Amino acid sequence: MKTVVIVGGLGMGERCYREVSATFEASGWRVLVPPLWVDERLPYADWLIRRAEMLRDYLRRERINAFILLAESSGGLPVMTYARLYPEALPVAIYLTNAVSLPRGKSSLSYILGLLSNWAQLVTSARRLSYGLRCLTDILTNAARHPRHVWQEIKINNEVDQMAYADDVPVKTTVLWGKSEQMLPTQYAHKLADRLPSGELVFVDGGHIWIHGRPELLLSIIQERHAND
């Protein structure tokens, strides 16, 4: 069985990806969403390393060897950190869906306002209103349970140069970018794909969180590229 491991966006846990999981599982895939909450107060680089370590430990416990790594939004930084730290345990491929890092100097308030807009889109664009509301509830619940983690994730997207983490990713990486992205300009997607050593850029219809409204499109993109794996 082919396996996709998802590292979610800000505050997003397993409940946010049930629609995505159901779509993939109906086609014979397994989807896993590891809990990578880091509630310690750490410098940004160490915080990312800790999340990468937790992902490595999770994969070992689950005895997962061949897998695809999918990162949504702020999940991009820990996924790229994992790939750079553990070349002996690389995924078959990495997919970054609207992986986001604000231009340096933008305020955390700008990021939070962008998130609120995205969450509103999530509720209205998910295939079912109940699904969008469930995911929003999951985000808020996780924020209450892991406030230090969530705040660190907001700050890191303003303070860390994500492009520098893209330079040494030693595996084929596809940037899947919603054309209606509101938090970053399209040029950012091109820059990210260009900085990745084996990067590819694919534009899709949708906004920042397009995979929740169009999981079947995500499935078709991945299946097309891994039909013979």
Image: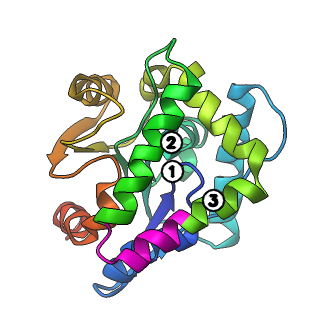
Residue 201 at what x, y percent from top left? 20, 38
| Mark 1 → mark 2, Cα distance in angstroms | 5 Å
Residue where numbered disc 1 is placed: 9
At x 42%, y 69%, the residue is 132
Q: Which residue is drawn at 59% across and 59% down?
A: 139
Q: Disc 1 vs disc 3: which is toward the camera? A: 3
Query: 34 or 122, which lies in front?
Result: 122
Q: Earlier in the sequence, mark 1 or mark 3?
A: 1
Judge the density around disc 3: few (<14), some (14-19), many (≥20) Cα neighbours within 10 Å. Answer: some
Indicate the position of residue 137 as horizontal and vertical percent values. 58, 67
Identify the residue position indicated by label 2 in the image.
Answer: 74
The magenta-colored residue range is 126-136
Instruction: State the residue position of label 3.
Output: 140
Magenta stretch, main secondary structure, is helix
Could you tell me which secondary element the residue under label 1 belongs to? loop
Q: What numbered label is drawn on residue 187?
A: none
